[in-house]
Amino acid sequence: MNQAAQKLITLWDYPKSFTIISHPKKAFRLSLTFSAGSAVTFTILGTVSSLVGKLMGKSASWWYLLLGVLMVLMALQTWEIYNFIPSTTLIAKNTRRGYIGAFIAGILGGLFSSPCATPVLITLLAIVADRGSLIWGVVLLLLYSIGHSALVIAAGTSIGFVRNMTSNNRYGTFNKGLKLFMGSVILLIAFYMFYLGF
C-alpha cells in the first residue's frame, strides 16, 4: 500500500470504525455526525480568519509576508518534502463513543484534517483572511466542509469503498499528480502574497 493510501486510511480511522456497526444506517448517521463536527470547526476557522483579516487591513505588508511564508510551508507539506501538520492520532485518543464521540472526533478532525487536506484548508483560510469578508469566509469554509465531508461519509459508511480506492494503482498516480498540482497552486498564491507584501 502506498503512502497516500496509508494517509487516507489514517484520516478515516475513526469514521471507518462506523462500518463495523452491523447497521449501515447507523454507520451513515455516525459518519454524518462526524462530518457535522468538522463543518462546525471549518466554519469557525473561516469566521476567525475573516475577522483577523479585517483587523489586519490591507496596509500591513508584514501580514502579506507572513501569509506568503505560510503558503510556502503548506506547499512543502503538500509535496511531502517536510511535514508541519500534527498527526491525526489526536482523533484516535477520543474516548467518547456514539454520536457525541463522533461529533468530538469531527471537531478534532476539522483542526487536524490530514497532512493532505490541511494545506488546502490553510490556503483557504489565508485567502479568506486576505479578503477580510465575514460572509465570504463563512460561505467558502462551509462549502469546503461539504466537499471534505462527502468522502468521509462514504468512507464511514462503506469500508469497501476505502479498500477499493486505496488498492487501485490509478488512485496512487492520480494522488501524486493532484499533490503536485495543488502544491504548485499554493506556491503561486505564496508568490502573490510576497508580491503584495513588497
Image (cartoon, rainbow, N blue to C red):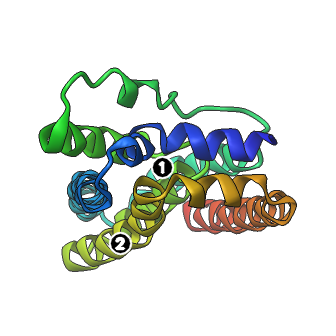
In the rendered view, tell whether residue 186 sits above or below residue 142: above
Could you tell me which quadrant the N terminus lies in?
Answer: top right
Within-10-Å neighbours for mark 2: few <14, some 14–19, many 20+: some
Circle 1 is placed at which residue position?
Answer: 62
Residue 167 vs residue 93: left or right? right
Question: Which image quadrant: the C terminus?
Answer: bottom right
How packed mark 1 is, by other alpha carbons closer than 10 Å (few <14, some 14-19, many 20 or more), is some
Q: Nearer the viewer, mark 2 or mark 1?
A: 2
Q: Earlier in the sequence, mark 2 or mark 1?
A: 1
Q: Note whether 141 is above or below 158 in the view shown.
A: below
* Amino acid type for the residue under numbered disc 1: Trp
x, y percent for residue 136: 28, 79
- Cα separation, mark 2 vs mark 1, equals 33 Å
Residue at figure coordinates x 22%, y 59% from the top left: 29
Q: Residue furthest left?
A: 100
- Between residues 187 and 141, which one lies in front from this camera angle? 141
x, y percent for residue 102 = 24, 43
What residue is pinned by disc 2? Answer: 146
Would residue 156 be found to the left or right of residue 136 on screen?
Answer: right
Q: Is residue 97 left or right of residue 122?
A: left
Q: Amino acid at mark 2?
A: Ile
Residue closer to the observer: 60 or 147: 147
Q: Is residue 163 visible?
A: yes
Q: Residue at x 30, y 54 (%)?
A: 27
Label pair 2/1, CB-CB below 8 angstroms? no
Q: Residue at x 35, y 45 (%)?
A: 18
Q: Secondary structure beneath disc 1?
A: helix
Q: For the residue labelled by badge 2, is the local secondary structure a helix, a strand or a loop?
A: helix
| Rendered position, 147 above or below 86 | below
Classify residue 48 as left or right of residue 5. left
